Amino acid sequence: MKNQEEILSKLNIDALNPMQKESLTVISTTTNTILLSPTGTGKTLAFLLPVLEELDHDNPEVQVLILVPSRELAIQIEQVIRNIGSGFKVNAIYGGRPMSKDKIELKHTPAILVGTPGRILDHFIADRFTKNSISTLILDEFDKSLEVGFEKEMSEILSELPNLKKRILTSATEGVKIPKFVGMENPRRINFLKKENPSQLTISTVVSEDKDKLKTLVQLLNCIGEEPGIIFCNYKDSIEIISSFLEHQHIHHECFSGGMEQKDRERALIKFRNGSSRILVATDLAARGIDIPELKFIIHYELPQRIEEFTHRNGRTARVNEAGTAYILRWDKENLPEFIPKSKPININKSNRLGEPYWETLFISGGRKDKISKGDIAGLFFKQGGLNRDELGDVELKQDCAFVAVPKTKSKELVNGLNNSRLKKKKVRITVL
């Protein structure tokens, strides 16, 4: 495997932070580890670096199992491992995608398997690979994956792992009870939840005279201006109501919830990441385990019902010493839960109107399996598309497709000029997403 300096260089990271340094030492020398650190501090890299060091290139079986509570977190960890370029095969498997896809990928057994509990258990029951070489188990966001809804599946999975030597549990939440079946005897705890520099999170209250809060929400968005942020809801139905209202107000946004098809969820995040959409209307599924950039704000449109939800939502902004604001949008007859600190209501009487995002996303019908690289895509848009370097936004390369952010003013012209172009040996379709 590459040495640490090469890995950090490839990931554009200057140096490990104190939490990552301590994790590297502790996980390398400890059987059971509990890693607690705020959202956005790099826990994935903290557990991957020491675990990758212990993998055996001569072992053709699964050696590491990483269990996660959401599909998005599985995809994110898989991508980080691919970006590291460790030389070990990794696959992410999760509900919401065809089982046939899993079967094809698992024919060539990965050294590292990442997945959601239900889908992992399906493959365990079908006996699609041997579990005898799985010596390391990682429960990422264990406060979620060990909740009551997952407990039976998790217990069955653990009972199928006879040769575990190392267990690593990570979370951004303290005080979660760990069931006995996990087998965490005498764990070492790495706790950076209170060691980090003081948070630069500002909590502000906005009071709505109307119970549905929609008009106040739009006023708040216009007041905030053209910054990226998430509007959090408790229910999928609320997302639909808000989305419909924002559409009527010509406010561009994306939606994200567990009720959406996996493909639509992924594409919503792609647009949000690359700036084609500045606003994500989401359930608590977006509070953790998804790969999105630093946000300037989040809005609690519906108040969280538990302190853990409040903590994780707020963890999407003011990350790693950056400033950010969590807005509490409260109906004036609504009582705040005890865990939400009281703050003086702010005035949002501003008449700004949000403009359209600068970027638009194009879809390309070719990806890694076609031997297409990000450089190939950039070359096409520079040479044949005539873009300048500052006019090419984020390029996201998937197994069978790619997504590119381009200036909205040039998107139709680029589609007309580049559709049915050749990338490597493949003729690709290029369309506006």
Image (cartoon, helix red, strand yellow):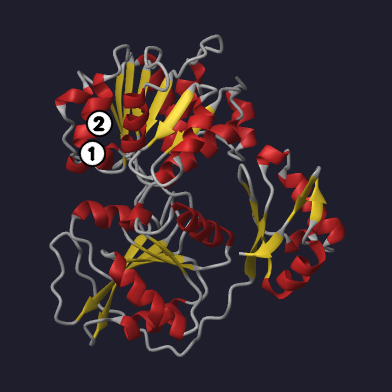
Q: Secondary structure at mark 1?
A: helix
Answer with left or right where residue 375 lies relative to residue 235.
right
Where 247 sits versus 157, above or below? Answer: below
x, y percent for residue 24: 44, 24
Label 1, residues with CA under 10 Å away: few <14, some 14-19, many ≥20: some
Residue 347 seen by the camera? no
The answer to which of 387 and 107 lies nearer the viewer is 107
Q: Which mark is residue 150?
A: 1
x, y percent for residue 336: 16, 69
Answer with left or right where residue 341 lies relative to residue 37.
left
The answer to which of 345 and 298 lies nearer the viewer is 298
Where 87 sits versus 56, above or below? Answer: below
Answer with left or right where residue 279 lies relative to residue 402.
left
Please, what is the three-letter code of the amino acid marked with disc 1? Answer: Phe
x, y percent for residue 173: 26, 43
x, y percent for residue 350: 43, 88
Q: Residue at x 36, y 45 (%)?
A: 70
The answer to which of 280 and 338 lies nearer the viewer is 280
Q: Which mark is residue 112?
A: none
Instruction: Kindly indicate whether the residue at mark 2 contacts the one at mark 1 (C-beta within 8 angstroms).
Output: yes
Disc 2 target residue? 154
Q: Residue at x 67, y 72 (%)?
A: 408
Q: Secondary structure at mark 2?
A: helix
Where 348 sits versus 311, above or below? Answer: below
Q: Residue at x 45, y 19 (%)?
A: 62
Label 2, residues with CA under 10 Å away: few <14, some 14-19, many ≥20: many
